[in-house]
Amino acid sequence: MRANTTVVSPVIPTRIVSLVSAARYLGVSSGKLHQLMEAGHVPTIVLPTPHGQRRSRILFDVADLDRCIERWKVGAA
């Protein structure tokens, strides 16, 4: 009889997130994040499509989101 074994997968920290996840991370709606992105306030990662179209998916680096949060703080000492 085999002993019960548990396979543990390594936890890989999430660095790149989708628009919905980034909006949730920042505490804003997806629409508001899209406005901030279009205005150049939030850096994005744009993956090209295989056929050279403008973009296939918009992603966000959590480190960039953290920098935005720090920049937007008001009254921090």
Image: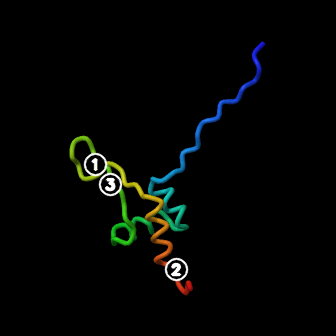
The residue depicted at 22 percent of the width and 42 percent of the height is 51
Label 3: few (<14), some (14–19) or many (≥20) C-alpha neighbours in 10 Å:
few
Alpha-carbon distance for marks 2 and 1? Answer: 33 Å
Residue type, mark 1 in image: Pro
Alpha-carbon distance for marks 3 and 2? Answer: 27 Å
Residue 73's mark? 2
User: SS class of the residue under badge 3?
Assistant: strand
**Residue located beneath label 3 in the image:** 46
Alpha-carbon distance for marks 3 and 1? Answer: 6 Å
Q: How many labels does the image show?
A: 3
> Looking at the image, is mark 3 or mark 2 nearer the viewer?
2
Query: Which residue is more in the foreground, 43 or 58?
Result: 43
x, y percent for residue 20: 48, 57
**Residue located beneath label 1 in the image:** 48
Tag 3–tag 1 contact (CB < 8 Å) = yes
Q: In which quarter of the image is the C terminus?
A: bottom right
- Upstream in sequence: badge 3 or badge 2: 3
x, y percent for residue 30: 47, 62
x, y percent for residue 21: 51, 56
User: SS class of the residue under badge 2?
Assistant: loop
User: SS class of the residue under badge 1?
Assistant: loop
